[in-house]
Image: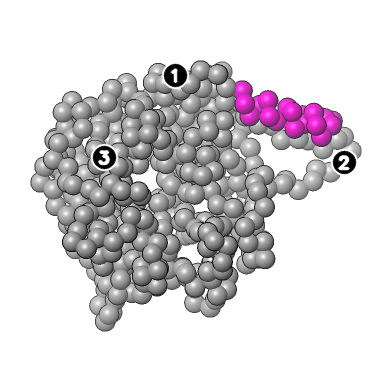
Amino acid sequence: MFHGFSGLAFVAAVLAACTKTSSEPPRPGYSTSIEPVASPSAPTGQSASPPAPVETDEPNVPEHEPAFPQQTRAPQVHTRTRLDVYTVAAGFDKPWALAFLPDRSMLVTEKPTGKLYIVDAGGQKSAPASGMPEVDGRDQGGLLDVDVAPDHERTQRIYFSYYEPRKDGNGLAVASARLLADTKPIIEDVRVIFRMQPTLDSTKHAGGRIVVAPDGNLFVTLGERSILEGRKQARDLSSDLGKIVRIAPDGSIPDDNPFRGRPGARPEIWSSGHRNILSAALDQDKRLWIVEMGPRGGDELNLVQPGKDYGWPTIGYGEEYSGQAIHEHTQQPGLEQPVYYWDPVISPSGLTIYSGALISEWKGNLLIGGLSSKALVRVVLDADRVSGEERLLTQLGARIREVVEGPEGALYLLTDESDGKLLRVTPAPS
């Protein structure tokens, strides 16, 4: 802790703590130790000031007022544990997703190439799996998420999402397949179990996160394709664009989906009014949380309820990249408010809700990958409201694409680079 420092001395101390890393570049088998950042104490006899929020740039849309206290810029918190960041493997071309197999080896996807790899616990990378379908790998497209079926040990099945090339454009597809794991993995019996409709010609905003629920059903997050033709369909229940859908493992529609049987509505829809969702996870109560990409300002944390409309593009807290207004209002009856929003944005991708004991102070916290923010963003909840926020691992200077809690409680990350890295975060040895 820092006691009685002058303002300049305190800033210098914090900067020194933040940058205490080795000057060697990260490489496989290399660890970087990151010291915790201490919070200043009030001088003796004085009461402590309320914690300030995470330091960021000024908001893009300062005239937008939050709907309730701490809906944005919550007080800054600090991880007390000294962290060790270990480079497990490197050399991935813009990796997108990571999933653990039952033997604790890992599946890793490469977005633009459409390649799927297996990485063992020692960091050895397999040859690319054969049998993967063709992907449209332009821009934000390619091979995206991967997850493992709950009955994988019996069926060998996995799920993956990708931009599927189609006549007149493309769209997100989700496939189920058998994985024959080896040093030369094979994908076989590929079955497309979901296709986003309608098809549009866009290289952006298809979403793509897959969340496999304990009952075996799949949540799939979808974007509105960025172009105006797609944006105007985000709240249209006859379109998949800008939605979260829920499907059974074979692609059929669960009986309790909220719009099943409603005339004119697509029965797979779970929720509507989303822009582009690249972060999604279930909490210990099996509730679905998402972190949604906003425009210029307005990234959102939402607790998703079936059948609800989250308002994009009618309401929101951001603006066009040009600086022009998008939204009619920030609030409207019948449209859901975000639990939290960021302005300026963090550019979220990847989410885990930490449940392990290895870093006990993170238990129940949301850990979000930040792309433009180049951070691991930690969000602390209290009764489903955000009570604190932290930006971690900024010393790495890396766009963090994926965040997964490992079976042993370590945190695993993928960096979004042409030489992308698989990192493991654990408490540093004492």
The residues bearing labels 2 and 3 have C-alpha atoms spaced at a distance of 58 Å
* Amino acid type of the residue that numbered disc 1 sits on in the rendered structure: Tyr
Q: Residue furthest right?
A: 45
* Amino acid type of the residue that numbered disc 3 sits on in the rendered structure: Thr
Q: In the image, is 63 to the left or to the right of 402?
A: right
The residues bearing labels 1 and 3 have C-alpha atoms spaced at a distance of 26 Å
> Label for residue 113?
3
- Do tag 2 and tag 3 residues touch (Cβ < 8 Å)? no
Q: Main secondary structure of the magenta part?
A: helix
Q: In the image, is 28 to the left or to the right of 300?
A: left
Query: 382 or 186, which is in the foreground?
Result: 186
Dot 2 corresponds to which residue?
Answer: 46
Q: In the image, is 162 to the left or to the right of 285?
A: left
Q: Is residue 161 above or below residue 325?
A: above
- Residue in view at x 80 percent, y 32 percent: 8
Image quadrant containing the N terminus: top right
Question: Foreground mark, 1 or 3?
Answer: 3
In the rendered image, residue 365, in percent from the top left (x then y), is placed at 52, 45
In the rendered image, residue 17, in percent from the top left (x then y), is placed at 66, 26
- Residue in view at x 36 percent, y 75 percent: 236
* Amino acid type of the residue that numbered disc 2 sits on in the rendered structure: Gln
Label 2 or label 1, whichever comes before in sequence order: 1
Which residues fall within the magenta stretch?
1-20
Q: Considering the numbered disc 3 on the image, is that residue within a helix, a strand or a loop?
A: loop
